Image (cartoon, helix red, strand yellow):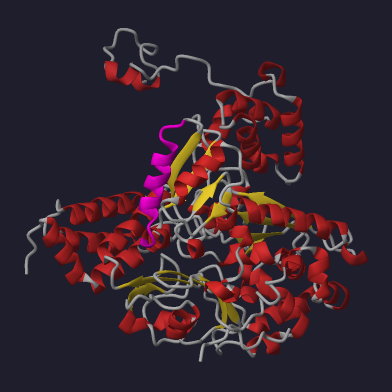
Amino acid sequence: MQMPETRVLLKHAEDPELRTLAGYKRYDGYGALEKAYRQMEAEEVLKELEDSGLRGRGGAGFSMGKKASFLPRGEMQKYLCCNADESEPGAFKDRELMQRNPHQLIEGIAIAALAADAGHAFIFIRGEYDLQADILDAAVAEAYEAGYLGENILGTRRDLELVVHRGAGAYICGEETALLDALEGKRGNPRLKPPFPAVQGLYGGPTLINNVETLSNVPRIVAHGAEWFRGFGTEQSPGTKVVSVSGCVQRPGNYEVELGVPTRELIYELAGGPGGGREVKAFYPGGSSSPVLTAEEGLDLPYSFEDMAAAGSMLGSGSIIVADDSVSIPHMALRTARFYHHESCGKCTPCREGTNWTVKMLERMVHGEATPMDLDIVASVQENIIGHCLCVLGDSMAMPVGAMVRKFRGEFEQVMAEAGTAVAA
Amino acid sequence: MSPVDGPGVSNPNLPVDPALVEGRVPDRVPEQVPELHEVDCPPDLKEHIETLMGRYPDRKSASIPALWAVQRLYGWCTPEGIRQAAAVMRVTPAYLESVASFYDLLHTEPVGTHKVAVCTNISCWMRGADELLEAFRSAAGGDEDIFVTGFECLGACDIAPMVSIDERYFGPLEAAEAETAIEQLRTGKDVLPEKALEKRPLAGDAGSTGGVPRAGDADA
């Protein structure tokens, strides 16, 4: 018996017409927007979102409604940014959501902008997603045409401008303050926090920043209510999640499931497991920045924010990368570290230097040029990055690499020994 | 005052350490915001950048889109193109240069007409990305018109190992398909039509390629 998906966000996604306004409206599209703009006060929308318990789907898992409630009230210009800079290795769910159902996102943005009283909204999409940006451009034009965006939405006194802004290739722009700098036309460097974007963000104004999947959940929460949404998932992780499963599995792809389903079923039943007689050795439960879990630690955990946190890792963006028993963990650590080294913006020393030296030491290990003490130095470098930078890019390397050294120390020593380094017993 | 404030100016009789002065005196006037009549900006480009600026509360927000426009027109962010955009945007060329040099997709040096980016990150690496990159490099064989590069995660681990060719995604690929793709690029044909991401069904609906049945969609 195979585990079924629970499609809410990806419902009807097999219909190619869904990406057009007419197709979206066939499935009650923009009904929630009509309800919110015509029948609800901004405070009611906000309360519905808070009550739903919807947690951010971009990585941090913070309550979306609470985040929106942090924006001050008043006459000042407020902004909403949709973070579509999905660049974390292993994550490709936002790409699917934008490509197959762009209007669901636009409707979510329009409703969230009402709740946050924002008059300007932006979708910051990574430059590599050219196809998806084209699809969004077309959908936004349709939404303007139909009066769901622009001035006096649906004849109300509310206005919303929505701009699709293409990035130009930098992982760091997924960090929310770097995203703001990039959107202001600068190099994407993170800012010192506080002040947080909710207080002082884009152009110095209060700014709500949410992930694509988070905002895509908004229309149905408003249409069916917070209680309905809480009927999916667990107490602390309500709702469904589009999970990107990749790496050593036979059917990699996006699968939408209720949060809290057994991780084993996600990997083995939906994604088909490693196949070819191979076994899962370890996996990143939430993208390449989450500490890897061994098969013994992680396969039988429910896939939820709280269970992954309790196991010392995180659900992150909800992206599972599976390594089977043929994958060399030290080489995987090197691949991971190289990514963060390449993407470090260079602003903070622990990250700039720490990612650089981690790559160098891991290269020495696999090339047989390491000294026995390198393994301990690598471990200590990771500890000295965490918590010491403006943003978490450095931590995002330190956590998985640190976990790999800790959990697979024997394999590191074996690789070093085979490559020619005398390792102390 | 110390010689640092103005070597040779405050007291010409004091000895000055050559290390403080050599190579540190600006040899030209700092570059200012160029005037439009100095740059010979194509009218279409000027109009396009002005439209872009109009979309944002602050015109500087248009810097990345403007650089994209320059790159589309000239193939890369040429110094002349950057000066033209700077003149339209009323910023210094150095400002736009600093932005262009930060981002991987904006090129501040000439690249080929066709851009081939092979993802070499974790999931693609596990499924043969290094071999695929090598295959593309050897298929392109030094052709300056085809710019082959390894790239960090492109967000398509479901079709690993994959490649982005002229901003469209293809995968999963066998190393042997690199030759076909490069040949199709050279002859102006559709590249790997069967492997385009756009045509792929959802993983759970893949049917013959191994999809799983779905018991029931959520009511909503």
Q: Quadrant of the C terminus of chain B?
A: bottom right
Whether residue A254 is visible, yes or no, is no
Residue B215 falls in image quadrant: bottom right
Please give left or right for residue A228 compared with residue A235 in the image: right
Residue lying at 75% horizontally and 79% vertically, measured from the top left = A222
Please give left or right for residue B86 compared with residue A163 in the image: left
In this picture, which residue range is highlighted in magenta? B126-143
Please give left or right for residue A36 compared with residue A283 in the image: right
Is B129 magenta? The answer is yes
Residue lying at 28% horizontally and 69% vertically, measured from the top left = A326
Residue lying at 39% horizontally and 70% vertically, measured from the top left = A248
| Closest to the observer, B4 or B203 | B203
Residue A65: x percent and y percent?
65, 75
**Vertically, is B208 above or below A95?**
below
Residue A6 falls in image quadrant: bottom right
Q: Quadrant of the N terminus of chain B?
A: top left
Image label count: 0
Residue lying at 66% horizontally and 63% vertically, measured from the top left = A98
Provide the major secondary structure of the magenta segment.
helix
Residue A283: x percent and y percent?
37, 73
